[in-house]
Structure formats: C-alpha cells, structure tokens
Amino acid sequence: MKKRTSKFIVIFITFLTIALVMPSALVLHLNDDFIIFELPDIALSASNTKEPEPGPPINEDVEPESEYSQNEYMESESELPQNELEEPEPDQLQSDIIEPDIDQTQSDFIDPEPDPIVTITISAAGDITLGGCPVSSSYNNFIREFEELDSDLTYYFRNVKHIFTNDDITIVNLEGTLTDETSHMGKAYNFRADPFFAQALSSSGIDIVSLANNHSSDFYEKGYQDTIDSLETEGVSYFGNKTNTILEVNGIKVGLFGFLTWVDSRENRNNIVSAIEDLQGKGADLIIAYFHWGIERDYRPNSHQRDLGRFTIDNGADLVLGAHPHVIQGIEVYKSKNIVYSLANFCFGGNRIPFDMDTFIFQQTFTFENGVLQNTNETNIIPARTTSARTYNNYQPTPVEGNDSDRILEMLDKLSNELNR
C-alpha cells in the first residue's frame, strides 16, 4: 500500500504541474488506483485559462511546485534588475571566437610590395691596360709615371672616379694581366702589371671587368689565374670566356658575358646562345654582352661584328658592348637596343703615343616597372680622352669639354648615323 501511495503522489504532482500551466487542457478520471489524462479536442487560448483552486496537500512532506503561472513568471522575470538577468554581453558571447589579426596575418604571409619602378645606370668604357709590355718603352714610362707620383694607385682614374662611383655598375675591358709571372707567349706584345695594381680598379669605382680579349692569357694559365686572384682580393668582379657573372643591383639581376670573336662562326654563335641561356636560367633580368672583335684602327665595324651583334640581341641580350679596334666606332640601335661597336682605348699603358687618344664613356639607364624591363633606351655619352696631357699619353683618362667634346660627339654621331640609316 505504501508503494502504491507513493506512486499516486508522484502522478498527482505531475498532473498538478501541468494543470497550473494549462488548467483546462486536461480531464482527470480515477480508475481504481490509476489516473487517466485526456486532452480536449480544442486547446484553450491563454485568455480563457483560469487559475485553479489550490487543493489540499496530499503529503505535507512534499513541497509543491512554483505557484506562479507562466505569464506571472515572465512578468516577474522582467521586473528583476538588469544585472541579475545574467544575460551575456555581446562581447562575452564572442569571447570564445578568435578573430584573426588582419595586420599580423598579412605581415606573416604577404611580402612587402616591391618598388614598382627601379632604374639601373651602367657606365661602360673601353680597353684598360695597366703596366704594358715589360720589354717596351711604354711599360717603362708607365712605371716611371707611377713612381714619380709616389706610387699613388688612385692617380689613373682620378678624373673619372666621380662618374664611376655615382652609377650602379661600371664595366671595362681589362686587356692584360695582373701577375708576377715572367713566362709569356711568343707575341710582339704581352701585357702585364704587378698584382697590386688591382687596387687602381677597386679604388676608382670600377665594379666588373671583361677578361675576354687577346691579352688575358699572355702569361699562360698562371698569369690568367693570378689576375683573377688579384681581382677577387680587391672585390672586383669579372666575366668573359667561360665565366658568366650576375651582379644584383637594386633588386635587379644583371647578367654579363663576353667572348673573343674575330669571326662570325658557328662556334661563336653557339657560345653566345649558351651564355645567354645560362644567365636566363640563373634569373638574370638584364643581360649585357661585351665582345672583343673588329679591326684595329678601323672606325667602322665589319660585317662579322654587325652580324654577331644583331644575333646576340635576337637571342636575348639587352645591350652589346665592344672593344679592340682602339678607336671609336658607332652605336647601332637594333630592335630598340644598343650595339656599341667600339669603346676605344681608355687607360692604355700599351702605347705612350696612341694613334688616337679620343674616347668616350657610354652610359645607359635601364628602367624596370614591376620587375619588367621597359623599352626606354635612355643613354648618355660622356666624351673623353685617354690622357689629361695634351700631346702624350699619361694614362689618366679625362672627360673633355668645348672643342674636344664637340669633335668627339660629332664623330660618334656621324659613325652612328651610317649604321642607323
């Protein structure tokens, strides 16, 4: 009986709870010890509901459910102070959501934008022979001049240093060796200077030299390697023959190569293509060729020079430079790119009184926009002479003005116009 009474009390409390919420929604029938609930066919609206009369307690030990109706509970809840409602603030609701830091994310994964416009100015000059042929009077004159100047290695390029230190890359042809080796080839002229003369280059702003010429091996492999070692000691770069070099300036990779090319041969063409492909494979953005070619004392390039120059541009070079004739030759503009056929002598210890002491510095500024080379062809010609003296070669190239400047520029214009007809 105690067990049935307890069960009856639990069922009755459940009924009472439902009745408080929907008082008219249920009909109660007693069938012996069981309570049966029946739902009416139509639910009553909230406005028709009435609060039931409280019935006698069935068991005083059981606490009845809340005496509030649903509406009364909602009203009482709205009357509570706002801070007691314990509703989370909007910020609290999002506290568990980690928003990415946009600035931090970009700094971690996005490289800073490169400068959209970058310029590179190169200066190119012709043949440089430090010292000279040890058995010639010119070599003795060169050394005597050096000793009389208290062995000042800055003497030779003093008058052009301001040009070479204000560009991005200065390129020359080093026609000779820097070695103590005495064994030499059986030629009429074998050029060399002591290895410490490399300081004359490094102290003047000359950045890189071509070794592709007919005098770089005058003292055999030993002399050639001594020259490379001397340049490396002074931080001067080099290229030519089998060595292709890349200099990186202002974020741009400048590739340089050079060859001795007397003739337009299949071998020379294959070497040119291979060098360009090698530099392109290394990521070169700009490619410059420097050839040793042509005929001495001839002011006009021969057909071999012109064919090879154009071939080099056709295969990807952006500028072609030339030396060996020891005199000025014209500049051809081919497919909006320049072929400078001969830059003439520059600082030339091979001859005390050269056949022609006129020369020039060729400058070109290359513009890159978003890493792409633009077709601007911005050039500058600086007329000069191989000497600061009037009647003889003192091995100190010097820019000129006035009549000398006019003469050199007129000569170069005339020779260039012949090529660009």
Image (cartoon, rainbow, N blue to C red):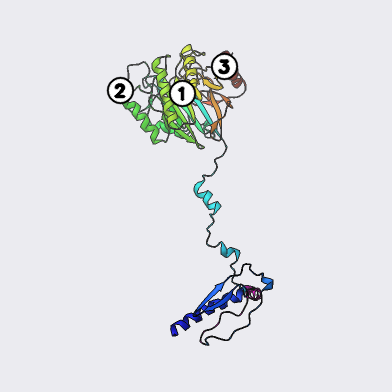
Return the residue nearer the eye: 404 or 16: 16
Mark 2 residue type: Ser
Circle 3 crowding by C-alpha within 10 Å: few under 14, some 14–19, many from 20: some
Q: Is residue 327 magenta?
A: no
Judge depth for marks 2 and 3 and give the one in front. Answer: 3
Which residue is at the far left?
183
The quarter holding residue 293 reads: top left
The span from disc 2 to disc 3 (Cα, nearest Å) is 42 Å
- The magenta stretch is 61-82
The span from disc 2 to disc 1 (Cα, nearest Å) is 28 Å
Point out which mark residue 290 bears.
Answer: 1
Q: Are marks 3 and 1 in contact (CB under 8 Å)?
A: no
The quarter holding residue 242 reads: top left
Circle 2 crowding by C-alpha within 10 Å: few under 14, some 14–19, many from 20: few
Label 2 sits on residue: 183
Which residue is at the far bottom?
60
- Rendering coords of residue 286 (x, y %): 50, 29
Q: Are marks 2 and 1 in contact (CB under 8 Å)?
A: no
Q: Is residue 68 magenta?
A: yes
In the image, is 403 to the left or to the right of 193? right
Return the residue nearer the eye: 77 or 158: 77
Point out which mark residue 416 bears.
Answer: 3
Point out which mark residue 366 bears.
Answer: none
Q: Secondary structure at mark 1?
A: strand
